[in-house]
Amino acid sequence: MPLSAKNMLDEALDYLSEEKPLHAMQILRRAIDNDPDYGEAYLKLAEIYIGSKNYDAAEKILSEGLAQIELNRSEDSVRDRLSYALGSLYYNLGNSEKALPLLRMLDSWRNPGVHLALATIFIEQNHYSDAMSEVRQVLRIDAKYPDANGVLGRVFLKQKDFNNAIKFFKRELAVNETSVEFRLDLATAYYLLGALWDALEEFTLLIDTDPDFFPGWLMCGKILLEVGRLSESEFYLSRAESLNPKSPEVMHSLANLYSTVGEIDKARSIFDELAKSGSLIEDDQDALERLSRSRDLTEPNSVWSHKPDETVGRRKHRR
């Protein structure tokens, strides 16, 4: 008597328990051929492909399963699970455009993972009210659901509501204290609010956690430069430069530091390099004006000898 698709799935699971994934895959393929409407076989086969990082094969088998189930009007629960699996795959691969319609089909689910994924996609698309609606649904289901408070903090951060952003980042870190991403978000919110000492403390914690964390060294250097602690600023900026020597933001900060302390030759050299690459920004202008008092800006060999407004590009955002 031929095995049913369910029996074949059980056999495939036995092979998986014996660490024989190729055998399991062969059995699951047979199960699908014998019963194309058996959604569990598609889901398990896709899971094996994802585990081996064969994402193209996983996408293909889930798409096949979803098309077959929809064609034969199979039960909604199977269709929904295939939609969730394929939508989650696209989401985790960064393909929000394909993930969104699949996940929106499941918006009525009380599944916090679906709502949180939708919230993240809506943030990417700058649809902040939709993002907030989705993440609040997550928090109604579970007030401590991983990442939910942090994602809500990001919505407020995008809306420049820094106080609320800080509140929700702190809530997230209270249960997820090792999160580098949300601590970086918290530090950024403090910085944009102008709470420089709080920002400095958070950036320092990030460095303590990971001594090679470039953004931490950079931002500590920038903050110390802003508050006038110049020798400390140079220490942090030099470390940032060693981690990312070509970073324009590090170069801007070092050039402004050197011009402030009167190390003219060092500042000139960096500004020359920035000008050659077209990377001068508005914040460089004050430093250039300081340097102009010690150098003739009409000197032919100077690549930044023309008027500042001819070389200074528009800054995309002001931090």
Image: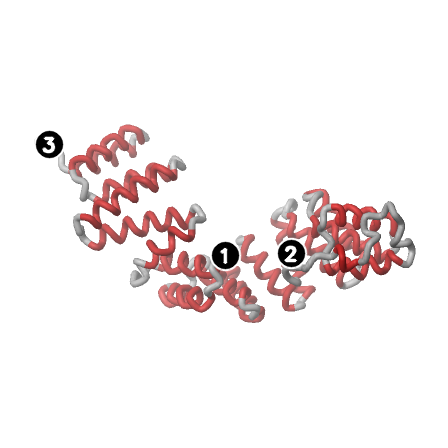
The quarter in which the C terminus is drawn is bottom right
Image depth: mark 1 or mark 2 in front: 2
Q: Can see residue 6? A: no
Residue highlighted by disc 1: 176
Q: Callout 3: helix, strand or loop?
A: loop
Q: Callout 2: helix, strand or loop?
A: helix
x then y, percent, for residue 26: 25, 30
In the rendered structure, which amino acid carries the disc numbered 3? Pro
In the rendered structure, which amino acid carries the disc numbered 1? Asn
Q: Do the residues labelled 3 and 1 touch (CB within 8 Å)?
A: no
Crowdedness near tag 1: few (<14), some (14–19) or many (≥20) residues, C-alpha within 10 Å: some
Q: How many labels does the image show?
A: 3
Between 43 and 91, the one nearer to me in the picture: 91
Mark 3 to mark 2 CA distance (whole Å): 63 Å
Residue 299 shown left or right of residue 277 in the figure: right
Mark 3 to mark 1 CA distance (whole Å): 51 Å
Crowdedness near tag 2: few (<14), some (14–19) or many (≥20) residues, C-alpha within 10 Å: many
Between 191 and 29, the one nearer to me in the picture: 29
x then y, percent, for residue 227: 76, 63
x then y, percent, for residue 130: 42, 66
Crowdedness near tag 3: few (<14), some (14–19) or many (≥20) residues, C-alpha within 10 Å: few
x then y, percent, for residue 135: 42, 64
Q: Earlier in the sequence, mark 3 or mark 1?
A: 3
Q: Callout 1: helix, strand or loop?
A: loop
Q: In the rendered structure, find residue 2 and report the number of the disc placed on it.
A: 3
Mark 1 to mark 2 CA distance (whole Å): 17 Å
Residue 256 shown left or right of residue 141 in the figure: right
Q: Residue at (54%, 54%) from the top-left corner?
A: 181
Residue highlighted by disc 2: 203
Q: Are marks 3 and 2 in contact (CB under 8 Å)?
A: no
In the rendered structure, which amino acid carries the disc numbered 2? Phe
